[in-house]
Image: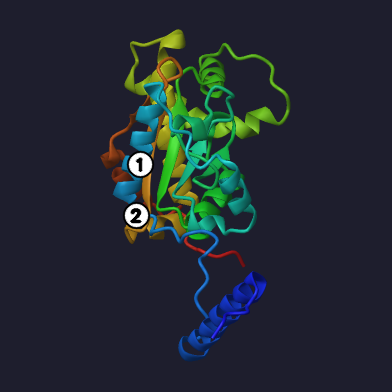
Amino acid sequence: MENNRTPLASVMLVLVTLAGIFLVGFLIFGKPASAPVVAQISAKGTPEEILQMLKDGNGRFSAGKPAYPHSDPTRIGLADRSDQGDYAYATVLSCSDSRVPVELIFDAGIMDLFVVRVAGNVCNTDEIGSIEYGLAHVKTPVLVILGHTRCGAVTAVSEAVAGHGHELERNIPPLVDSIIPAVKRAMEQHADVHGEAIVPFAIEENVWQGAEDLFMKSPAVRNLVKAGKVKVVGAIYDLATGKVEWLPQAKIAETLQRVEASPDKETEVFAK
C-alpha cells in the first residue's frame, strides 16, 4: 500500500507515541523524582576534622594560594534560601581590627563561618550570647578564640596598667576592662619584661582570659564542650605572615576544669 503520510503527520505520530509511552510509565511507576536544586551537603564532620579544615584554609591563605571557596553567585543565592546551620562549620571570636579579615584568613566563604568580632576579642555578655547562638543554634562544632599580633586594645590596656594610659571615650573602658586581668598576669609571669615587649605575652593571656570568661558565664558552652560536641581552641593570627598560631589545647581543658570548680560560675543554662 502506498504511504500517503506527509512529513508533518509522521512527526505528530512519533510525538503522540512518545507521550503515550510516558503516560504508561507514569501510571506504572509514579511521578519521576525531580533533581534537587542543590545537592545535600554531608555532615559537618567532627571537631578535629573541622579544625584541620581551618588549618588547611589558613595554610592556603598564608602561602598566597587561596581557593576562595563558596563565594560564587550560586552560593550567594543559596544563602537566601538556606539555613546557615546546615553549612557553617565553625564559630570564630575575633578582634574588630581591619587587619584581621576572618573569612580570608581561613580561606572560607559565605555560610562557612559564624563570626563574632569585637575590639580586643573580649568575651562580654554580647559576645558570649553570640557564641552561644553559634554553638547551640547554628551548631558549629568548633569555636576559635582568635587574638592577633599588635592588638591595639591589648596594647592600650597594657599601657594603662603600666601607668602610661591616655584618655578614652566613655564607652571604651568598660569594653576592654576584661583585658586587665590578662595584662596583669602577663606582667607577673614576665616580671623582667617591660614596655611594649609585654604586649605579645598579654595578647596570649587575653585569649585564655576570653576562654575563662566564656566558661564562667555560659553553662551552655561548658556542657557542649564536656559532651564532646564542641571544641574550643585558642589561636593567634600573625599580621606579618598571615599565619595562625594554634595555642596548646591542654590550656583550654585546664581552664574549663578550674571554672567547674569555681563557686562563682553561672549554672542556669536558659534565660528566665
Residue 36 lies, with reference to residue 262, above or below; the image says below
Instruction: Determine whether the residue tagged by mark 1 lies in a helix, strand or loop.
Output: helix
* Residue 100 in view (yes/no): yes
Name the residue beneath numbered marker 1: 53
Q: Quadrant of the N terminus?
A: bottom right
Q: Quadrant of the C terminus?
A: bottom right
Name the residue beneath numbered marker 2: 45
Q: Nearer the viewer, residue 144 or 204?
A: 144
Numbered label attached to residue 190: none
Q: Position of residue 252 (x, y in %)?
A: 33, 43
Do callouts 2 and 1 mark residues in contact (Cβ within 8 Å)?
Answer: yes
Q: Position of residue 140 (x, y in %)?
A: 45, 53
**Residue at 45%, 20% in the rendered image:** 149
**Residue at 52%, 52% in the rendered image:** 134
Q: Position of residue 164 (x, y in %)?
A: 57, 11
Q: Nearer the viewer, residue 203 or 137?
A: 137
Q: CA distance from mark 2 to mark 1?
A: 10 Å
In the rendered structure, the answer to whether residue 185 lies left or right of residue 36 reads left
**Residue at 57%, 25% in the rendered image:** 97
Residue 168 lies, with reference to residue 119, above or below; the image says above
* Residue 138 in view (yes/no): no
Residue 97 lies, with reference to residue 249, above or below; the image says above
